[in-house]
Image (spheres, helix red, strand yellow):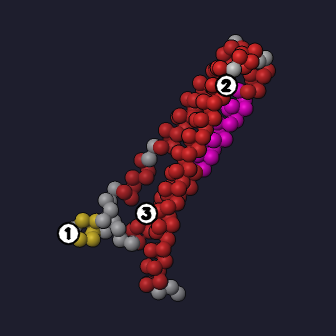
Amino acid sequence: MILEDERHETVLRLYPIFKEEVYRRRDQMMRWTAIGAGSLVAILSIVLLVPAAHSLSATSRLLLACATLLLAITYMGIIWQQHNRHQQAKQQLIKIEQVLGLFGEVHDGHALYPDDWQNEWTRDRSLLQYMAVLTLLTGIVLVAILLPSL
């Protein structure tokens, strides 16, 4: 059986680990979005600027379009996975903060953390933004690849 002091010490040691995990997963989401967007812009640049790309056959264009779509879906899957892990870490962090009493009254009738922080993560729209950027860039690249063959 764990004593109350040991439990409190364990929670105090877990807190920075989960806090860092929340930030690390958010950073990974942004990093993979930037890598995906950069890759798509590179493909777009090659398709538009390299003269040999204009003479690709319809089959080659279709294969390039499929590969581009697969690449974008892969990036989106990685970002989705990081987002899910971010949410799990955030939920656990909030539980730890609740145990530490960071949302309860500390002094002067005020909590150390605002009460709405406990639910703020449910209104996070960053995943939608990251996916929208990659979807729009993918669409632009696909149009650039397929349009000359029409």
Side of 63 relative to 92 (left or right): right
Q: From this view, report whether residue 49 is shown above or below residue 1.
A: above
Side of 144 relative to 100 (left or right): right
Which residue is farthest front? 50
Q: Upstream in the sequence, badge 3 or badge 1?
A: 3
Circles 3 and 1: CB atoms closer than 8 Å: no
- Kindly state the secondary structure of the residue where label 3 is placed: helix
Gap between marks 3 and 1 measured at Cα: 23 Å
Side of 51 relative to 3 (left or right): right
According to the picture, the residue beneath numbered tag 3 turns out to be: 94
- Kindly state the secondary structure of the residue where label 2 is placed: helix
Residue drawn at (67%, 25%) of the image: 46
What residue type is disc 3 on?
A: Ile
Q: From this view, report whether residue 17 is shown above or below residue 117.
A: below
In the rendered structure, find residue 46 and report the number of the disc placed on it.
2
Residue drawn at (79%, 21%) of the image: 59
Q: Quick one: quadrant of the C terminus?
A: top right
Q: Upstream in the sequence, badge 2 or badge 3?
A: 2
What residue type is disc 1 on?
A: Asp
Instruction: Name the residue nearer the viewer: 71 or 127.
Output: 71
In the rendered structure, find residue 108 and report the number of the disc placed on it.
1
In magenta, the rendered stretch is: 65-81
Residue 65 position by quadrant: top right
What residue type is disc 2 on?
A: Ile
Gap between marks 1 and 2 measured at Cα: 62 Å
Residue 74 position by quadrant: top right
Residue drawn at (39%, 68%) of the image: 98
Residue 93 is situated, as x and y percent measured from the top left of the image, at: 46, 63
Q: Upstream in the sequence, badge 1 or badge 2?
A: 2
In the rendered structure, find residue 20 and report the number of the disc placed on it.
none
Q: Which of marks 1 and 2 is in front?
A: 2
Residue drawn at (49%, 57%) of the image: 22
